[in-house]
Image (tube, helix red, strand yellow):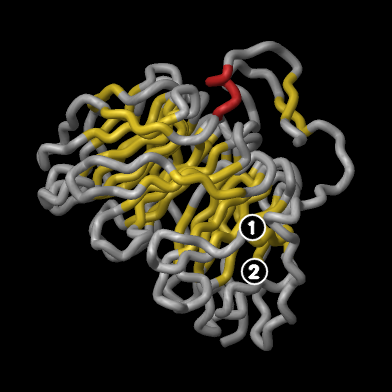
Amino acid sequence: MPKTTASCGRKKTAALAAGLLLVTGCTAEKTPQAPPTPSSSAPASTPAPAPASPVSFAPAVALPVGDNPRSILSADFTGDGAADLITANLSSSDISMLTGDGKGAFGTAVSFPSGRISLRMDVADLNADGALDVAVINVSDETVTVLLGDGKGTLSAGTPFPTGEGPSGVVAVDLNGDGLLDLATSNYDGDDVSVLIGDGKGAFGAPQGFATGDGPGGIVAVDLDSDGDPDLATGNYGSDDVSVLFGDGKGGFAAAQTHTAGDSPYATVAADLDADGNQDLIIPNYDSDDVTVLRGDGGGGFAPPTRHAAGDAPAGVVSADLNSDGHLDLATANFESDDATVLLGDGKGGFAAPVAFPTDDGAVRIVAVDFDGDGKLDLATCNAHTDTVSVLTNTSAG
């Protein structure tokens, strides 16, 4: 199993930045290897035929943000109805906000201190005041910092709350059924997830841990067994698998179930890719240059995993209908090929061969949002090497 190697020593936490640019300042590179051969339990899928509706994007526009951005999200932070962008910046330990004008342009980035070595984040109304807030994990402090929004584009000074060891992902969701948002973090060093129960006012309790596989990275909360309670899933970079933890609706979780992924999975997202009404899991595999799809059956089970080629070192993935044909597609941010690859879906869980669109250097995460109000979803990546966001405007017909 190929893994990344680094030019200097480090503890496990240093590798959790998606196996990419390290906390210590060393550079990680993939071990030279032959093209990956997927195992029989995760067969390489034959690409679906090219759809009748292709997809195209204008050349990427670069927008400066903080130092070494590692995650990107979009939401309306100013209440004007236009989509804004935020990035969590690992080296400058802050959040950058770019306010959108609804026509595809963005203002100069404004920074908000977040915590030491800010890596991933989530956006939600954590204090129930009607304004969006940000929760960002901090690798060095092993905390999640909550920055409360005022609804006008300003975030308050952050309040930190303890997590598990080496936090690597975070999601905001009501885990105990009290109507208030809680937080769950994946913890790369702790090989677990932490649940922090919220009080509805922006504060969170002590973390409670639940074991996962080795080196969990991204985390997603979604109801996978159709019982009405959110479950958790993590992609585990160290054990090349996915952990699924079924929730009891009271803040507790059953022992993790394990499902095969590719080589060095990290991010994890959920979507109904085959339109059967059940949520599926999508996991980019950094070292095997592909994406694993686990198609859910709605009862907590999954079909055998399939793998679909992506770019070089996919580190982030998003699912959205990019060519407006009514089917969900995939787009990955590829750290080593410096691009976004789009895999057009057929609505049955199959995907066409990937098509690449250049970004700035070191694309890490990706979002799909209509930035210019034309009804078509655009793409944006955060780029660790150039301290930028790349915005790719959708120019597809239709």
The dot on residue 57 is: 2
Please state which amino acid type lies under the numbered disc 2.
Phe
**Residue 371 visible to the viewer:** no
Query: Residue 130 versus residue 187: which sits nearer the camera?
Result: 187
Mark 1: which amino acid?
Answer: Ala
- Which residue occupies the foreground of this view, 273 or 68? 273
- On the image, the x and y values in percent for residue 256 come to 42, 41
User: Given the current orientation, which residue lies at the most extreme right position?
Assistant: 34
Q: Quadrant of the C terminus?
A: bottom right
> Residue 373 appears at what percent x and percent y?
42, 73
Task: Determine which of the numbered discs, if any, sits on residue 60 in the image.
Answer: 1
Up-down: is 22 above or below 266? above
Residue pictured at 55% horizontal, 60% vertical: 294
Per the model, the C-alpha gap separating discs 1 and 2 is: 8 Å
Packing grade of label 1 (10 A; few <14, some 14-19, many >=20) is some
Rate crowding at label 2 as few (under 14), some (14 to 19) or many (20 or more) other CA atoms within 10 Å. Answer: some
Instruction: Give the x, y percent position of residue 269.
Output: 48, 54
